[in-house]
Amino acid sequence: MTVRLAFAAWILLAAPAFADWQPDAGDDLQTASSAALIELREAGGDEFETMFDEAIAFAVFPRLVRTGVLFGWASGRGILVVNGKFVGYVRQRRFSLGAQVGRQTQGQVILFRDRETVELFKAGGLEFTPQASVHARKPRRAADGSFRPSVAVFSLSQKGLMAEAAIGATAFKFIEPE
């Protein structure tokens, strides 16, 4: 009972931050995504808020697991919200090759500025190339730049240690809710 009351209070307090979107309390991935979005927004500061306000959609991955020793692999599941409405689930997979070592978990939000980019993302036609980075155990925010041209990526390391100078690709798969 106390957990439900705390969750309800948390949802009410967080409501303005998500425009119209409210997570479905019966969907664990939506509630985890909501919590991750709150954490990323708190860590992101004014830069994140400005870009979040400009975005028409966002994808949230509450937990991406990254592993690397020469070859790198990352995967995670998330949700996609367009114009304040939950539209489906998203799977992210990343492969990289280069100087890298470690294991890390992180939360991530991808902001979209226009509908064409959202549709390209849903169709699986949007890919990213990882950049060089070092992430230690202490949680920290990483902004992967401003909208380029219509996408901005923010990550928050949760735990682990990862160092990389690698090249690769990130692929996304959109899944309609049943």
Image: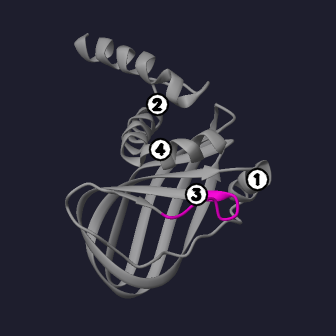
Residue bounds of the magenta highlight: 144-151
> Magenta stretch: residue 145 in it?
yes
Location of residue 75 (image quadrant): bottom left
Between residues 176 and 14, which one lies in front from this camera angle? 14
Question: Residue 133, percent across and down?
Answer: 36, 75
Element at badge 3?
A: strand
Report if residue 23 is visible in the image: no
Give the amino acid type for the residue marked by disc 1 in the picture.
Glu
- 67 sits left or right of 50 in the view: left
Check residue 8 in the rendering and tell me which mark sits there, or answer none. none
Camera-near label (3 vs 4) is 4
Camera-near label (3 vs 2) is 3
The structure residue drawn at horizontal position 42% and vertical position 45%, both measured from the top left corner, is: 45
Residue ID for mark 1: 119
Q: CA distance from mark 3 to mark 4?
A: 14 Å
Question: Residue 156, percent across and down?
Answer: 36, 54
Estimate how packed mark 2 is, as few (under 14), some (14 to 19) or many (20 or more) residues with alpha carbons within 10 Å: few
Element at badge 4?
A: helix
Q: CA distance from mark 2 to mark 4?
A: 30 Å
Q: Residue furthest front?
A: 46
Q: Earlier in the sequence, mark 2 or mark 4?
A: 2
- 89 sits left or right of 8 in the view: right
Residue ID for mark 4: 46
Element at badge 2?
A: loop
Q: CA distance from mark 3 to mark 1?
A: 16 Å
Check residue 27 in the rendering and tell me which mark sits there, or answer none. 2
Give the amino acid type for the residue marked by disc 3 in the picture.
Ala
- Give the prevailing secondary structure in the magenta stretch: loop
